[in-house]
Amino acid sequence: MPESPYFVKIRRYAGSIRHPLATVLAAGLAIHLLVMLLAMVYDSDYWAVVIRNINAGEGLYGMEGYYYTPVWGYMLGLVSAFQNACLSLGDSAVRVFEAIYFEASGHQTTATVTSVVFNYCTKVPLLMCDAVLAYLTYVLVYDMRRDRGKATLAFALVFLCPVIIGSTGIIGMPDTMAAMFMMFSLILLLRNRPFFAGMCFAMAALTKFFPVFLFFPMLAYLFSRNRGDLRAGCMQAAVAAAGAVAVAVAIFLPQILEGDLSASFQFITDRAGTSPVSDIFARLVGYTRIAAYLLVILASILAARFIYRSDREGLDRSLLKGSMVIMALCLLYPPATQYIVVLVPLLAYYIAAEDGVCMRSWWLLAIGAFIVFTVSLSTHLLPLAVHTGIVDLGSLMHFFDLWNAGPGVLTIWNITFVIGSVIQYSGIAVLLLTVYGADLKKVLEGRRTGIGF
């Protein structure tokens, strides 16, 4: 497929820079570090509570406050150890009387405002994951195309993507860790390292669960690569499973010893709406989510079928294309912006190595994420206002009122959030239509019986 003129211009510009990868890295680090001055205090205070529980000897699940698998909790434990050993920070968060005005608004915010230094301590490890994630995308494109220009473009599409920058720099969520380990697992699988691929797959799925839907495509890839030698395929699958089990045991062993294993999976029951304290609406939303993910599992099985039937020359590309499509389908259920992080590196690979036309999807996701993140700017600036005085707290309250102006639910805040979310959805829909539009048209016209991955 011919490259779009816009895509060609980007590649030419990148090629004119003497050290493009270093330039992109430096620019990305500067942007990340600047954005990290902001914080979604609702989430950052949550991490502060977890660290206080750890310091109180309660572990991750001894007290109320942590509802994820242990991977991110262990990272917060390392952050706590670093703070205790190297820094004297005072309070990681303070209760601010004036900020109760924000807390009482009904938006997801809190009057307990974390310090700027604390926010950097929790986000810098995620920034490192962002950099590794972008470099893994660079490596993947270079392995597939042997073109450093395309690989550098892929690095830039990841490291400079507003989805990535906002998820790490503002929210401070570990989705980038899951994406990083997912990319590790795919690259290791392509390089015929099934044991380490299994280890990284387990790390990805046990950080945020979206990568678990790649189980069937990756398994089909192993057997397709060893087609004609069932024993070799089974051996590689067993080796990958051994790697995954080894990591899972290492992650959950402390929880098993402490009797907290069931609490490690509370995030599943909460999000499925099956928690005993869930109301009717939460249960309805949860069961809808279950139905959506059952459909994604079905799509994952279909993707595995097409991957298994791919010829040897196109097998690697089929795995990567199928993985991107499955991650996109996961996001069709109303996603938080940070969930899209798992799609970004695969989309960047596809743009740089396969089809530059998909750049349209990247722009839509980027613009949508930018709008969603800026909706809450008045509360994101609270750490700067409270702990540095650079921003006036009264001005933030006025800004907050302005964004919440409007009749009923038709506030500027809500309307802008919906606009950003719709643009994000459009990015996912445009990606799927770009990849499968021609095939879908043939199916509807009766000239094809199915869509391949």
Image: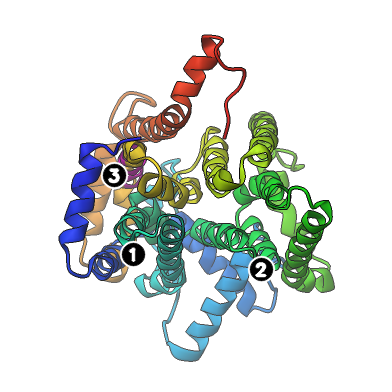
Earlier sequence position, callout 2 versus callout 3: 2
Residue 170 falls in image quadrant: bottom left
Earlier sequence position, callout 1 versus callout 3: 1
Residue wearing tag 3: 400
At a point 75% along the width and 58% down the height, the residue shown is: 263
Label 1 neighbour load within 10 Å: few <14, some 14-19, many 20+: many
Does 1 appear above or below 152? above
Horizontal side, residue 403 vs residue 242: left or right: left
Residue wearing tag 1: 36
At a point 33% along the width and 64% down the height, the residue shown is: 36
Residue wearing tag 2: 196
Of the pair 246 and 271, the residue shown nearer to us:
246
Horizontal side, residue 291 vs residue 362: left or right: right
Amino acid bearing label 3: Phe
Between the residue at mark 2 and the residue at mark 3, the CA separation in whole angstroms equals 48 Å
Examine the structure image and report whether residue 197 is included in the region drawn in magenta.
no
Of the pair 265 and 144, the residue shown nearer to us:
144
The stretch of residues the image draws in magenta is: 363-373
User: In the orientation shown, which residue stands out farthest toward the bottom?
Assistant: 85
At a point 65% along the width and 78% down the height, the residue shown is: 56
